[in-house]
Amino acid sequence: MIKILGFILTIIGGLGLVMGILGVFGSMDIGMSPWALIILGIVFFFAGIGLLKNRKDTDQN
């Protein structure tokens, strides 16, 4: 379960980073600040990577 959440957070973070970078360089208009997308993308990406690296995929505590 933790690995699934980590994978989802990593994908969302990567998409946020890509959309933010495209918004900064002017080739995509998102409707919100591209810098906010970049910051959220970084946070979600590193949170997902951290979950994938440090957790075992078991349902036991």
Image: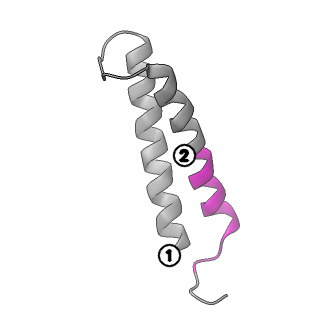
Residue designated by label 1:
1
- What whole-number distance in Å separates the C-alpha atoms at marks 1 and 2? 17 Å
41 vs 54, left or right, is left
Principal SS element in the magenta part?
A: helix
Mark 1, secondary structure of its residue? loop
Residue at the spot 60% in from the left edge and 62% down from the top edge: 52
Label 2 packing within 10 angstroms: few (<14), some (14-19), many (20+): many
Residue at the spot 41% in from the left edge and 10% down from the top edge: 25
The quadrant where residue 18 appears: top left
Q: 36 and 19: which one is in front? A: 36
Residue designated by label 2:
44
Q: Which residues are magenta?
A: 44-57
Q: Residue furthest bottom?
A: 60
Quadrant assignment for the C terminus: bottom right
Amino acid residing under circle 2 = Phe
21 drawn magenta:
no
Residue at the spot 38% in from the left edge and 19% down from the top edge: 22
Find residue 31 and report its horizontal and vertical position in percent. Answer: 31, 22
